[in-house]
Amino acid sequence: MIKDYAFDIECFPNFFSISFEDMNNDKNTFSYYIWFDTVTNEVHNDYQNIISFISNNYRLIGYNCLNYDCPLLAFIQLNTNTFNNVNDMLNQTYFMSQRLIKYDWQNSSIEETQEINQLRYFKHQFTQIDIMKILGHDKLKKSLKQTLININYPIIQSLPKPFNETVISNEIDLILKYNRNDVNGTKVLTKFINNEILMKYTISEKYNIDLINTSRSGMADKILATEYSNAINVPYSVFKNNRTYHRVISIGETIDKRIYFSTPELKDLLRKLIETNIVSTTEINYSVLINNVTFNIGTGGLHSKDRPGKFKVDNDTEIIDVDVNSFYPYLIINLGILPAHLNPVFLKIIKDKTEDRIKYKKLGKTNLTSKLFANGLKITINSIFGGFNSEYKFWSDRKCLVKTTINGQLLLLMLIESLTKSGFNVISANTDGIITIVSKSRKDLYLEICKTWSERFNFSVEYTNYTKYIRRDVNCYLAQTIDGKIKYKGDMNPNNYKDYTRSGSFPGFDRPIISIALSEYFINNIPIEKTITEYISKPFKKNEDAPIYMYCSTQKADKKFNFQLYKIVKGEPVRTTLQKDLRFYISNNGGRLFKVNKENNNSISSLFKDYLITPFNNYKKSKDYKINFTHYIIETQNIINIIESGNTNKKKIRENLFNYKLNL
C-alpha cells in the first residue's frame, strides 16, 4: 500500500528545505535542509537524506507542487553531477526556483517551455497530488494561506523573511517551523476535500483516464474529449482546435416552434426575441413583468428580480419549489442542440452520461462509490452548456448556447404563464426552478399543470415543500422544508465559507456569525443579540471549529500594498505592519486597520473605519476576546431590516440602524 505524505519546499539564495508529514500519523514528520553560510562558509547538507526519502514508493501531496515543488525536486535530481559544491547547488536551485515562479507559458520561448516541461513531466518514483490544481486555485491564483483561512486552520503564517534574502543561522529554525506549518496545513486541507479526491480517483478508474490533478472543469473536458475521441475513432489532437464561429446569431432561428404565449407581455417578449440578431451573447438582456414579478432573461438563465421578504405557510397554503432535473443537459438532448462541427454521436454521449448520472444518483443513497461517480457525471454534463460559449472547448459554438438558454427560459416562462393564468402566485424563479404559493384546495391543479408541461417537453421534475422561505434576493435566501431541513443559498448560508465546489473555489471568509444569527432568528425565533453574544461561549470538541472563527473576516493585500495596524499604546501612537494574508475580528480593544501603498505611505485607505480590529492569524484560546458584539448585531439587523421591511432604500436602512444602535 502506498504511503501518503504531505510536503512543501522553501527556497532562498543560500537555503533549501523540504518537510514531509505522514498523512496518517501526526508524529511521523521529517524536515531536511541544505544551507551555506555566505560569511563563515559553514555547510549543512541533507541532500542524500532528501534523495533517499523521495526514492521510496511514497505519494506526495502538495499545494502547487506540480508547477513548483516537484519540478524543483526534479531539477536537483537531474543535475546532481553538474553541481560543483553546495553553494553552487543552492545558487542554481534558487535560480530555477525563481524561473518556475515567474514562468509564463504564453510569453516564453520554445526552448524554455521545453526545459520547464521536462522538469514537470520527470518520472519520479512517487506519485504527486496537487491540491491547488484539484481546487482550481491555480487559475484563480488563490494561495494556500487564503485557502487555509476557509477551513479555519489555526496558524496563518507568512514567510518569515523575504525569499530573495540570504538566511543566517539563527533564522533556520524559524523557516523550518514555517515550512512544517505549511505542510501540516496542506495535510489538513487534503483531508477536508477527501471526497473530492476520492471522486477524481473513482472517475479516473471508471474511464481509465488520469484525472487526479485536475479541476472540476478540467475533469469534464478530459472525459468528454476521451469519450468523443473513442466514439469517432479519431485522436483528440485532430479535433481539439475545431470550433464553429458565428459573426451574427439570429435568436429567432434558435427558438423552438412549440413555444407560444397567450398573454400580451410574453407575446411581446417572444416577438422581440424572434426579431433580434446579436453579435455577442452578452447582448441577451431582457425582462418581463408577470403578476408584479419581474423576470430577467440573460445568458445564464431565468432569474426573477425578487424583493426581500418572508413567506410562511398557513392552514390554507403551501410553498412549493418545482425543479427540473438536469435541466440544461435535457434541453440539449431534447432539442438536439449540436455544435455544427461535431458528429451527432456527441449528443448520444451527453444522453448516456445524463442517464448514468440519474442511475448512479439513486444508487448513491446507499453506496459511496456510486455517489461519487454520480457527482462526477453531474459536473461533466453541467459543463457542456458553458462550454458552448468558451473558445477553449472543442464543442465551442455560441449559437448552441443561445439555443439552450433562450429555449430554457422561454419554456419556464410558459410554465409560469400557465400557473399565473390559473391564479397561482409565482414568487421566484432561478435557472431551473420555480417557487409558487399554492392553495391546498387547488394543489391538484397545480401538480397537473406542472405534469402536463414536463411531459410535453420531456422533462422530469421534483417538488420540495417549504414551511418558511426567507429571502434578501433571488441568490440569498433560506428555506425550511416540511421535514425540518434547511436549504440555504448565498450569504444566508452559515457554512458558505466551506463550499469549495462553488465555481471551483472557496468563497471569501467573512463573519459567518451573521449568517448563523440570521438562521437562528428566522428559523427558531432566537433574538440575534442572544446568538451573537452567546455563541462565543459555545462548547466545542477537538475536531470542531472554535467559535471565535465565526466572528472573523479576512483580507489579502496585493504586491503594491501592505496592512498596517494603528494603535495607541501608553498614550503613544504605534504603527505595526501586518502580514499580507490577514485574519481578524472586530474588537473593543484592537487597532484601526489601514491598507497602505508601499511606495507612497501617504496613500492610505481605512478598512472597517468605524471599528477596531484584532488580528487573529494565530489561534489563541481566551476567556474574553473583547469582541465588539455591537458591530455584528448591527450588520445582522441591517439584513433583517431589509427582509422584514422589503425596503432596499439605503437611506431608510441607515436611519433604522441609527435608531437601533441607540437602543442597544
Image: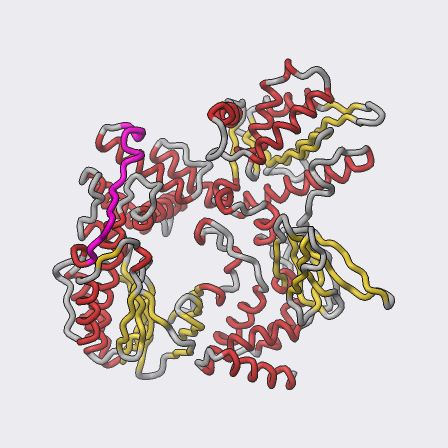
- Residue occupying image coordinates x 62% and y 22%: 76
Asked if residue 321 shows in the view, the reply is no
Instruction: Say left or right for 111 vs 628.
Output: left
Give x and y (percent) for residue 632.
Answer: 61, 72
Depth check: 269 or 541 in front? 269
Residues 575 and 435: in front is: 575
The quadrant holding residue 161 is top right
Query: What sort of colour scheme is used for the picture?
Result: secondary structure
239 drawn magenta: yes
State whether residue 507 is above or below residue 533. Answer: above
What residue span does the magenta drawing correspond to? 235-251
On the image, the x and y values in percent for residue 151 come to: 58, 52
Residue 247 lies left or right of residue 40; in this view the side is left
Q: Position of residue 212 (x, y in %)?
A: 45, 36
Taking the spot 25% from the left edge, 56% from the top edge, the residue there is: 278
For the C terminus, the quadrant is bottom right
* Residue 234 visible in the displayed image: yes
Residue 266 within the magenta-colored segment of the rendering: no
Q: Residue furthest left?
A: 257
Give the percent coordinates (x, y) of residue 298. 31, 61
Relative to 586, does residue 331 appear above or below in the rendering?
above
Is 480 drawn above or below residue 178 in the view shown? below
Q: Is residue 148 left or right of residue 626?
A: left
